[in-house]
Image (cartoon, rainbow, N blue to C red):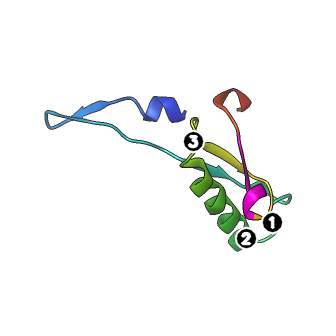
C-alpha cells in the first residue's frame, strides 16, 4: 500500500511524489480509549518516518521500545 501511494503521478503537467508514513496501534493491546490509541499510533507514525518501509507498529511507552518496523509482507 505504501509503495503504491509513493508512485509518481502527474497533476497539471507537474510530476508529484507523495510519501506516506503509517503508525499502527491495536485495541486493546495498545490502549482501551480512543485518545490513547491515537496517541500511540501517532508515536508509531513518527517512528515510521525514519524507517525504509515507513510502517511501524506501536510497542510500548518507552521511546526506545515505542515502535517496531514492519514490512509490507506483514499485511
Residue occupying image coordinates x 77% and y 71%: 33
Name the residue carrying label 2. Answer: 36
Which label is found at residue 43?
none
Residue occupying image coordinates x 52% and y 35%: 2
Q: Bounds of the magenta span?
A: 63-69
> What is the C-alpha distance between the residues marked 1 and 2?
5 Å
> What is the C-alpha distance between the residues marked 1 and 3?
22 Å
Asked whether 54 falls inside the magenta stretch, the response is no
Q: Quadrant of the image for the N terminus?
A: top right
**How busy is the neighbourhood of tag 3: few (under 14 within 10 Å), some, or many (20 plus)?**
many
Residue occupying image coordinates x 82% and y 68%: 32
The percent position of residue 17, horizontal first and vertical second, equals 33, 37
Q: Are marks 1 and 2 in contact (CB under 8 Å)?
A: yes
Q: What secondary structure is marked by label 3?
A: loop
70 left or right of 65? left
| First-in-chain label (1 vs 3) | 1
The percent position of residue 9, horizontal first and vertical second, equals 29, 31
Name the residue carrying label 1. Answer: 31
> What is the C-alpha distance between the residues marked 2 and 3?
21 Å
Residue occupying image coordinates x 64% and y 30%: 72
* Near-viewer residue (73 or 11): 73
In the image, is residue 35 above or below residue 70? Answer: below
| First-in-chain label (1 vs 2) | 1
Which label is found at residue 54?
3
The percent position of residue 28, horizontal first and vertical second, equals 85, 60
Question: Which residue appears farthest toward the left when viewing the image?
Answer: 13
Q: Are marks 2 and 3 in contact (CB under 8 Å)?
A: no
Asked whether 68 falls inside the magenta stretch, the response is yes
Q: What secondary structure is marked by label 2?
A: helix
Amino acid at each position: 500500500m505504501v509503495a503504491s501511494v509513493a508512485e509518481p503521478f502527474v497533476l497539471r503537467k507537474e510530476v508529484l511524489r507523495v510519501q506516506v508514513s503509517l503508525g499502527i496501534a491495536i485495541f486493546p493491546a495498545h490502549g482501551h480509549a480512543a485518545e490513547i490509541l491515537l496517541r500511540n499510533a501517532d508515536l508509531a507514525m513518527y517512528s515510521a518516518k525514519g524507517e525504509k518501509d515507513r510502517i511501524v507498529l506501536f510497542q510500548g511507552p518507552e521511546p526506545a521500545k515505542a515502535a517496531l518496523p514492519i514490512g509490507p509482507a506483514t499485511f
